[in-house]
Structures are given as structure tokens and as C-alpha cells.
């Protein structure tokens, strides 16, 4: 009855809760207001205090400057402590005054490092800032060492230990606050540029400051780590120290810094930690500084060579992991490393030339002599000269020059591969091989440095010859099948030897290789080439190359590269014995079977070392490839189909013009196919004769004879041996490039059909046709003798000129008489104003050779190659050397095999193999004619003085001899009567007044039925000397 309603109770509780919340909010507002008031009062108080202190500081220095009061150490201490308490960036000037005053008295030991940190990290150092930078550095130098303190002199000496402890505490404080990072920024900004902006005093102070904590900590690992990461990784810092402050070199030697760095980095974990912290660019800078220190401290380098080599190898290996062979979205360009997959600090690029110069000490003479001391200390045994065996004149001079120098180095074996000496040499070779694969942009510099010492490579070869029980090939083949670290190191030694030797042989000219025999003797090159040839062959034939990756694949390319350099030089100028390059254990029939089945090893063999296969078998393979292509294109007549035939009509008086007009527009497959030629005279009357390939052969030979005639000025002849190459002035013909392409097609057609033509090319031109000039091992200067031997001698004399080449008055240009006008060709832009000096003479020689053999005839050669390759697939010719391609074009240069010719001769008109005239003919050719006359005889009948490469069985049409009774204009062919008279030697009338004639298009000799052998001999000799053949039947 007296109860309170439920709704009223709820309202009452809500009101009470709201009242509590309002009271709580009011209290929080009051507290916040009090807190804000406190903050404001504190801020205002600080501002007043700062203002008061700044005024006090300003008044202090103003009074001192006006002389109204004298400064003393105690007052300076008090005023400095106040300023440091309130220091802000705006107080820089006041702080500078404090520092200047402090240096006037003895140093105090209160120092606020963030102040210096703000200053030193400023990248722009103006002249005023440089002044105060020196001031701050002087402060730091003073505060971290008691040697300059006045208070510890005399009676104060007892205080030195305690004060030194204070200095060490200061250095510890500096280190904790990132002092090394600030010094690194300062050094990098001042030194990582083409011209350093730091003075001698500044640089000395910075290096002294950076070294003191390390020394104070007794070279603890932590401090050495910081020093390496922040100081020794500054680009070329050792180089700048060596130039600007040579006294620092004494300081480094006194503390034996290099040895301590080497031993610290010899722990793999510590070295890896350093590399990871620095990344690639700065690791390279650290590497350069360590190498420079090693160069400056030869004694330490010699004593710690093993650790030094290991450290450098580890750092290079770390960088190598990020070196890429090509550009991608994940790579950056580095001027030393090439494409690099880590971030590149482009701010260091300006200093990279100096870093590169430091790296060059690694392959400089001094360091190489120190590291390879075990190899270079080996004396190559001398021998007395022995009477030379019968040999070509080519080697007489070389033998007399080199026979008394030392024994020929051959594999002998006897040195254990696990010995300390071998392990040391292997590790050094691994270092340089790692450098070659990592420092991609200066690879040639490294190779040049390693080949500078004439005796390094021969002694390294002597060292290799002594390895293992027997020496030579067996040991390295075993290493290929082992995956041990020892095997990898041995293979790295072989790889370095091959890379360096290949580079050396590439840059040596023929005089240095064959006559002076620089570094290697000819006999050693023969031994080495045999070793390389067998090594590469076994890698391919034993299936190792098929699955090779990484290091094994690089090894193969290295060994194969040098092998091919030696082979190509041997092709240019022979130094090996007959059949030196052939593998007698390789059966061509087995190889061809495997090629048919598509076996990988057979394909690789043909790709990399086709020279191990006899030349005749390779020619057979080439002809088979051509035949297969003809079959695939439907160019061979079968029982079910006939090939398409292209008919052309040619006027004899305008053979070249008509052939060019009618053939140049034909599709390539039509040129490869059957072409029938019909000759007409100027009146349009057909000539007698049916073309069954014979007339086309004559047409092709005549076309080729005309276009390669130097009088036409499409081609020129070299001086001396009169070999053909494109004429630089061929542009006098309006359509000369189209003509060159047409000539290339015609020559390609001749090779395609197996028609040999007597066209001797200059070897440098054939090398370009084969694409050898694109090889990294190609050297223009080596090919120059094939163009102009006298010009080559003159250029190489400049190379050997002992005086100042500048006195010769040469420039980087070439003056040429072009049709009566003197034309100056610049070898490089602005070359006619650039003198040839001792520094650029090697470049001049190569530029000149390249200009003469490539630049001058670049367009003509490209057009010729375009036409030739449209008929002949360039891959087909990869199995032939330059001289072998010449033989493919012009036939074999061996003497004519009369037995082979006799065996494959076809007789007509009553002649047969037992006919007396035929017997006389073969007897005259074998007994009365010399080799030159036999060649003239062959040219008289076939238009080519050389026999076919595969023998006369492959001569198309076959070699034929026909008995004739009348002159060619009366000859109507064989009749039953003429055949019977010829067979039974019945003469219609005495042919004594007639000469033998020939139809070269059919390879046909037309021989009268002479009554005496002497008449046959005289008439035949006269006919071939007067060249009375070339008549059409």
C-alpha cells in the first residue's frame, strides 16, 4: 500500500549515476587544467632558463672579447656545462666558441656527442663548415687521448692512468652513439668522388679517431668488425691515406692492422657477417682496401698468404652469387661487377676508377710474385742445344733461338695432390678464377696482368705436369668424376691456366709465337694442344658434357676456348705434325651412325671439335647433308616425281649481265634446284649442245671467272700471294652491293652442287664468311698477313719500337690513295688530330688492322655473306676451318692421284683403257709431266687445277676422253665408223697437225688418234700451256 512504483525507482538510480559521472568528469577537467598549466609553466620556465643561459653565455664571451673579464678553466667549465644542458641546433655558433676556448685550456671531460653527430652527418661541407669540422675533430682527438694534455705532464703523470680510463669511457660512449657510422658518412662524402674534398689534417684526424677505440679495446672482435664495416669499406680510403697522409702507413704497420684484419676474416662466420652487412658494392670497396694494404705490406702478405687468399676468395664468392649474366628487372648495372642483383649504391660510381686501381694490385707483378712464389721459384732445367733434326725452314730460326733455354715441359707426374704446396697453389688459382668470374667488367685487365710475367704460365704448366702419379690427362679426368673440394680446386687450376694461356696466345703475334717463342716453346704448344684435344674429346664422348652444369660447364668452355685458339692459329700457320688433331680411336662410321640416330654426344662432337674427324669424312657428311636437303625440297628426280627446272637463255657476249638479270630474282629454292642454260649468239641463234648439267657448269665457271676478275673491280688481289677479297672501291658500280649478293649466291651454288672453281680467297675474308670475326678470340692483327704481309710487318715494328712512338708523327687515321685522290680515314672520331703514343700504339695497330680488313669492306662483305648463306647454311660450314672451306670451294690442294683419275675415267669414240694412245697419255702424265703440268692438264679439261676433295669418283660430269678425227667445227659426234676406227687404231687421215681440245662443261678431253707418243706429248704440252680448250660440244 505504501510501496514505491518500479518506474520511479529506476529513474532515481539513473539520476544518481548521471550525477556521479558529472562529478567524475568535472574532476578530470580540473586535473587536465592543472596538468596543462604545469606544462605551460614548465615550458615558459625552460624558455626563460634557456634565454637566461644563452644571454649568460653571450655575455661571458662578449666580456672576454672586450677584455672586461678574464676567462679561466673553471668559469669555462661552468658556462660550457650550462650550454650543453640546453643545446639546440641554433646554438652552433656558441658551441663553436666553447670548443675554441676549451682548446685554449686543458680539455674537460663532459661532451655531448649528439651535437657532433648532427654536424658531422651534414653532407654539404662548405669552406666555413670545413673550418669548424677541423675544430670538432681536434676536440675529439684531444678528448680521446691524454698525450696532448698539459695537466699530465711532470707532476701530473700519476694522473695519466685515471685520465686514460676517462678517455676510454668517452670512446666507449662515442661508439655506443654510432660514432663509426658518422665517420663513415663523413669519409664517404669526402672521398667517394673523383677529387677528395678532405684535407690531409682532416683525413689524419678521422682515421686516428676511428682507430683509437680499436686499439683501446685491444683489437676486440667487435671493434675490428665495426672498423672493417664502417672505415675499411669506404671507397679507396687506403689509397687516399697513402697519398695524402703517408705517416698513417707507419701507424698501420705499428699496430699490424693487416694481419689482424686477415686473421679476423679468416673465420668464415665473421667474413660472411661482414659481407652480409656491407652487400656487394661496399664489399668490393673493402676488398680493394685490403688488397692495397697487402700490396703495401709485402712481408705480412707473404707470411699470411694462405689466410689472405681465403679471405679474398670468400668475399669474391659472396659478390659472385649476385653477379648476373644479363639485364633484368631485378638487376642493376655496376661498373666493375656488371649486372648485379643486389642494390647498387650509385653514389660510389665516381670512386670506382680508384677502387678498380686498388683491385689491380691483386694481379700486379708484386702480388703475383708473392702469391705464386712456390711456382715461380721453380727453375726450369736447362739443356745444351742439340743438332736440329731435318725440319722446315720455318722452325730453324725458332729452334736456334730457344733450344738452349730449357727442356721441353711434358707430363711427368710425381707430386702428391694433397701436399701443402699443391693445396696452396690450387687455392691461389681458385682466387684468381673467382675474380675472373666475378669482376666481369675488368676480366681482360685481370688476364693481361696474369700473363704479364713471361715465366708464370710455363712454370704453372710445369707444375701441372708434375701432379699425380703420372701427370697429365688422367688426373684431371678423374677429378671430373669426383665432386670433392680437392678435385674442384685442381680443375680451377686447369681452368685458370687455360684462360690465361688463351688470352696470351691471342694477343701474341706470329713473330712472338713462332720465332721468339714467348712463354711457350712450339713443342710445348704441341703437347698442350694434344692434352686439350683429348680432354675435350673425352668430356664429350664420355657423356660428361651432356650433364655438365656450373663449374664443369665453365671448365669445358675454358679448355675448349684455348684448344680452338691453338687450332685456328695452326690452321693459319702450321706448327703441329700431320694428323695431330685427329682421334684415331674414333671411328667415323660409328659417329655417322650416332648422328643418324640423333645421339647427343655425336652432335656435340660435331659442334665443338669437328677437326677430330678426318677431313674427307666431314666433306662426305657435308655432301650427305646437301643431298638430304635436296630430297626434302624435291630437287632430286625420283620414279614418282621430277624436280622443277628453271630455264635461262644467255648471250655469250653478255654472260654476266644476262645471268645477273635472270637469276637474281629467282627464289632461293629455284637457285638450289635444276637450272638449264641455253647459249645464244648475238643474233639470237641457239648454239649447239644439250645441257645435262654440263652447260650450266660452264656458265657458272664463266660467271665466277668474270666477277672475280680484278679488272672488274668487284674484287681485288692481295699483295704477294694474289688472293681475292672485296674491293673497297667497288662502289664505282652503281649496283655493287646487289652484285656482291649475286656473286655470293653463285659461289654458294657451286659449293652446293660440288662444282670446284679455281677462286683463291684471302683467308681473312673467308674467316668473315664463316663468322669467325664474331668470336671473342678473334684478333684482326693475326689475319692481317693474309691481306698485306708488308703492312703487317710495318705495324708490328711499331709495336716493338723501343723509342717514343710519338716521334714517328702518326695519328689515329689512315691515308689512302683512292683513284688519284688522297683520302683520310679516321680510325676513331677525331682520330686525325690524335697522335699515336706509346700508351695507345697497341690500340692503333688493332684499329688499323680492323679498318683495313673489316671497316673498308663491311658493306660488300655483308652483301656477299647474305647471298652465300642463302644457299649454304652457315651451320654446315662450322665443321670446317678457313683453309678447309677454301678446299671445299677450289678442290684439294694435294697432288693429282693419277691412279684415281685413271680408275674413274670414261672413254668414248673407240678409246678404251688398253688403247695405245690412252696408255701413252697416262705414261706421259706420270713420267714426263711434273706436278705443275699435271695441274695445268686438269685445268685444261675441267677448268680447275685441283682435284675434287673426295676424289675423281665425285667429279660431275665424270672425267672423259674421246677419240676425235676432225676439228671441232666439223665434229658431229661419234658414229659407228669413227668408233670402230678409233678402237682398232685405224686413222682416217694423219692428225699430227691437230691439237688436243676439251669441253670443260663436260670435263671432256678430245684427243686425236696420234701415231707417236712423242707427238702426243708435244701437242698436249703445247695445248695445256696455251689453254686452247673451253669449246662447247
Image: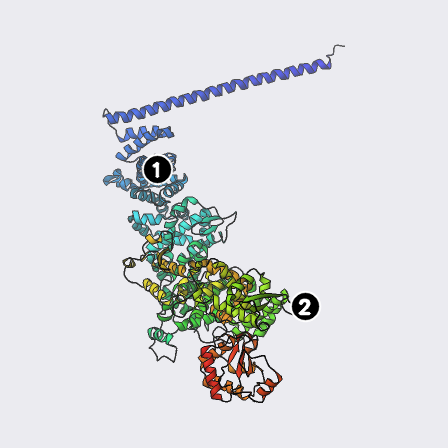
Residue depicted at 39% across the width and 23% down the height: 47
Taking the image as shown, residue 421 lies to the left or right of residue 991, namely left
Q: Point out residue 614 in the picture as x, y percentages from the top left corner.
A: 52, 74
The reply to whether residue 621 is in sight is no
How crowded pointer 2 is (Cα within 10 Å; few <14, some 14-19, many 20+) is rated as: few
Residue at disc 2, secondary structure: loop
What residue would you read off at disc 1? 125
Q: Quadrant of residue 210?
A: top left
Name above or below for residue 434 compared with residue 37. below
Look at mark 2 in the image and give the residue it sits on: 641
| Residue sitting farthest toward the front | 683
The correct choice, above or below, for 458 with respect to 202 in the image is below
Q: Nearer the viewer, mark 2 or mark 1?
A: 2
- Disc 2 versus disc 1: distance between alpha carbons? 89 Å
Q: Would residue 684 be found to the left or right of residue 168 on screen?
A: right
Instruction: Specify which label sits upstream in the sequence, 2 or 1.
Output: 1
Residue 947: give its label.
none
Asked whether, in this view, residue 276 is left or right of residue 216, the answer is right
- Which color scheme is applied? rainbow
Q: Mark 1: few, some, or many residues within 10 Å (few <14, many ≥20)?
A: some
User: x%, y% of residue 155?
Assistant: 24, 39
**Farthest right residue?**
1
Quadrant, the C terminus: bottom right
Q: Can residue 666 be seen in this view?
A: yes
Q: Position of residue 274 (x, y in %)?
A: 44, 49
Under tag 1, what secondary structure? loop
Expressed as whole percent of the image width and height from the top left, the position of residue 263 reads 40, 54
Q: Nearer the viewer, residue 104 or 468?
A: 468
Amino acid at each position: 500500500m505504501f510501496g514505491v512504483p518500479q518506474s520511479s525507482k529506476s529513474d532515481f538510480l539513473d539520476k544518481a549515476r548521471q550525477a556521479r559521472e558529472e562529478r567524475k568528469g568535472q574532476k578530470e577537467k580540473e586535473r587536465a587544467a592543472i596538468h596543462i598549466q604545469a606544462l605551460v609553466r614548465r615550458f615558459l620556465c625552460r624558455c626563460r632558463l634557456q634565454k637566461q643561459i644563452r644571454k649568460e653565455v653571450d655575455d661571458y664571451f662578449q666580456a672576454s672579447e672586450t677584455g672586461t673579464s678574464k676567462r679561466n678553466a673553471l668559469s669555462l667549465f661552468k658556462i660550457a656545462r650550462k650550454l650543453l644542458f640546453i643545446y639546440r641546433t641554433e646554438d652552433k655558433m656558441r658551441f663553436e666558441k666553447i670548443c675554441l676556448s676549451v682548446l685554449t685550456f686543458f680539455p674537460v671531460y663532459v661532451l655531448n656527442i649528439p651535437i657532433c653527430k648532427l654536424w658531422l652527418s651534414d653532407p654539404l661541407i662548405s669552406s666555413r663548415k670545413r673550418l669548424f669540422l677541423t675544430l670538432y675533430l681536434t676536440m675529439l682527438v684531444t678528448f680521446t687521448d691524454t698525450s696532448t694534455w698539459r695537466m699530465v705532464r711532470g707532476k701530473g703523470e700519476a694522473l695519466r692512468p685515471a685520465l686514460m680510463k676517462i678517455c676510454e669511457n668517452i670512446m666507449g660512449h662515442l661508439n655506443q652513439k654510432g660514432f663509426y657510422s658518422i665517420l663513415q658518412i663523413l669519409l664517404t662524402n669526402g672521398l667517394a668522388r673523383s677529387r677528395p674534398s678532405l684535407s690531409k689534417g682532416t683525413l689524419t684526424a678521422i682515421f686516428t679517431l676511428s682507430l683509437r677505440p680499436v686499439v683501446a679495446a685491444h683489437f676486440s672482435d667487435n671493434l675490428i668488425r665495426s672498423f672493417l664495416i664502417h672505415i675499411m669499406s669506404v671507397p679507396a680510403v687506403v689509397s687516399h691515406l697513402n697519398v695524402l697522409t703517408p705517416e698513417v702507413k707507419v701507424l698501420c704497420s705499428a699496430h699490424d692492422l693487416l694481419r689482424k684484419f686477415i686473421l679476423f676474416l679468416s673465420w668464415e662466420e665473421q667474413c660472411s657477417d661482414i659481407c652480409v652487412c656491407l652487400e656487394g658494392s661496399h664489399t668490393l670497396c673493402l676488398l680493394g682496401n685490403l688488397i692495397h694494404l697487402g700490396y703495401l705490406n709485402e712481408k705480412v702478405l707473404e707470411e699470411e698468404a694462405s689466410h689472405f687468399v681465403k679471405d679474398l676468395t670468400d668475399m669474391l664468392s659472396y659478390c659472385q652469387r649476385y653477379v648476373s649474366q644479363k639485364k633484368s628487372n631485378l638487376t642493376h648495372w655496376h661498373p666493375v661487377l656488371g649486372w648485379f642483383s643486389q642494390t647498387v649504391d650509385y653514389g660510389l660510381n665516381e670512386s670506382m676508377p680508384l677502387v678498380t686501381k686498388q683491385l689491380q694490385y691483386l694481379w700486379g707483378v708484386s702480388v703475383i710474385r708473392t702469391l705464386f712464389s712456390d711456382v715461380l721459384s721453380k727453375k726450369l732445367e736447362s739443356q745444351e742445344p742439340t743438332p736440329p733434326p731435318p725440319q722446315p725452314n720455318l722452325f730453324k730460326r725458332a729452334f736456334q733461338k730457344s733450344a738452349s733455354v730449357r727442356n721441353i715441359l711434358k707430363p711427368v707426374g710425381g707430386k702428391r695432390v694433397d701436399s701443402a704446396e699443391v693445396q696452396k697453389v690450387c687455392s691461389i688459382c681458385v682466387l684468381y678464377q673467382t675474380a675472373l668470374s666475378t669482376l666481369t667488367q675488368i676480366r681482360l685487365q685481370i688476364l693481361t696482368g696474369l700473363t704479364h710475367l713471361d715465366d708464370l704460365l710455363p712454370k704453372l704448366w710445369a707444375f701441372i705436369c708434375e701432379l699425380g702419379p703420372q701427370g697429365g690427362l688422367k688426373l684431371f679426368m678423374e677429378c671430373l668424376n669426383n665432386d670433392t673440394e680437392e678435385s674442384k680446386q685442381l680443375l680451377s687450376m686447369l681452368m685458370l691456366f687455360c684462360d690465361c694461356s688463351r688470352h696470351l696466345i691471342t694477343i701474341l703475334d706470329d713473330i712472338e709465337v713462332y720465332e721468339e717463342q714467348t712463354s711457350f716453346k712450339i713443342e710445348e704448344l704441341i703437347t698442350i694442344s694434344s692434352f686439350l684435344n683429348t680432354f675435350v674429346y673425352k668430356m664429350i664422348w664420355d657423356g660428361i658434357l651432356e650433364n655438365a652444369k656450373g663449374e664443369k660447364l665453365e671448365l669445358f668452355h675454358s679448355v675448349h676456348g684455348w684448344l680452338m685458339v691453338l687450332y685456328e692459329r695452326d690452321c693459319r700457320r702450321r706448327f703441329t705434325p700431320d694428323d695431330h688433331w685427329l682421334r684415331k680411336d674414333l671411328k667415323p662410321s660409328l659417329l655417322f651412325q650416332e648422328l643418324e640416330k640423333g645421339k647427343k654426344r655425336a652432335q656435340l662432337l660435331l659442334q665443338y671439335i669437328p677437326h677430330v674427324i678426318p677431313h674427307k669424312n666431314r666433306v662426305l657428311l657435308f655432301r650427305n647433308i646437301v643431298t638430304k636437303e635436296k630430297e626434302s625440297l624435291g630437287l632430286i628426280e625420283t620414279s614418282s616425281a621430277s624436280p622443277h627446272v628453271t630455264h635461262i637463255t644467255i648471250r655469250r657476249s653478255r654472260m654476266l649481265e644476262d645471268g645477273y638479270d635472270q637469276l637474281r630474282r629467282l627464289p632461293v629454292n629455284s637457285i638450289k634446284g635444276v637450272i638449264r642454260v641455253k647459249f645464244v649468239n648475238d643474233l639470237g641463234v641457239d648454239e649447239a649442245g644439250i645441257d645435262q648439267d654440263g652447260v650450266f657448269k660452264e656458265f657458272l665457271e664463266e660467271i665466277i671467272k668474270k666477277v672475280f676478275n680484278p679488272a672488274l673491280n668487284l674484287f681485288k688481289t692481295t699483295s704477294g700471294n694474289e688472293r681475292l677479297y672485296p674491293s673497297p672501291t667497288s662502289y664505282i658500280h652503281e649496283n655493287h652491293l646487289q652484285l656482291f649478293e649475286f656473286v655470293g649466291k653463285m659461289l654458294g651454288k657451286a659449293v652446293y652442287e660440288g662444282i670446284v672453281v679455281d677462286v683463291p680467297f684471302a683467308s681473312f675474308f673467308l674467316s668473315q664468311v664463316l663468322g669467325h670475326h664474331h668470336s671473342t678470340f678473334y684478333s684482326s692483327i693475326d689475319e692481317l698477313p693474309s691481306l698485306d704481309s708488308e703492312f703487317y710487318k710495318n705495324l708490328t715494328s711499331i709495336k716493338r719500337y723501343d723509342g717514343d712512338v710519338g716521334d714517328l708523327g702518326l695519328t689515329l687515321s689512315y691515308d689512302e690513295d683512292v683513284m688519284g685522290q688522297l683520302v683520310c680515314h679516321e680510325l676513331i672520331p677525331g682520330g686525325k688530330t690524335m697522335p699515336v703514343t706509346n700508351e695507345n700504339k697497341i690500340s692503333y695497330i688493332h684499329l688499323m688492322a680492323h679498318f683495313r680488313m673489316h671497316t673498308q669492306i663491311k658493306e660488300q662483305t655483308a652483301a656477299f655473306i647474305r647471298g652465300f648463306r642463302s644457299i649454304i647454311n652457315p651451320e654446315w660450314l662450322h665443321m670446317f676451318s678457313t683453309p678447309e672451306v677454301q678446299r671445299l670451294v677450289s678442290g684439294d690442294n694435294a697432288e693429282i692421284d693419277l691412279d684415281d683419275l685413271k680408275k674413274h675415267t670414261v672413254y668414248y669414240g673407240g678409246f678404251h683403257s688398253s688403247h695405245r694412245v690412252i696408255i701413252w697419255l697416262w705414261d706421259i702424265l706420270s713420267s714426263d709431266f711434273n706436278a705443275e703440268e699435271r695441274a695445268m692438264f686438269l685445268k685444261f679439261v675441267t677448268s680447275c687445277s685441283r682435284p675434287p676433295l673426295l676424289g675423281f669418283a665425285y667429279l660431275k660430269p665424270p672425267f672423259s676422253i674421246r677419240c676425235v678425227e676432225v676439228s671441232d667445227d666439223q665434229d658431229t659426234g661419234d658414229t659407228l665408223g669413227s668408233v670402230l676406227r678409233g678402237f682398232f687404231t685405224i686413222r682416217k687421215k694423219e692428225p699430227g697437225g691437230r691439237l688436243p681440245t676439251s669441253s670443260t662443261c663436260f670435263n671432256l678431253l678430245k684427243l686425236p688418234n696420234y701415231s707417236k707418243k712423242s707427238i702426243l706429248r708435244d701437242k698436249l704440252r703445247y695445248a695445256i700451256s696455251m689453254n686452247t680448250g673451253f669449246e662447247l660440244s
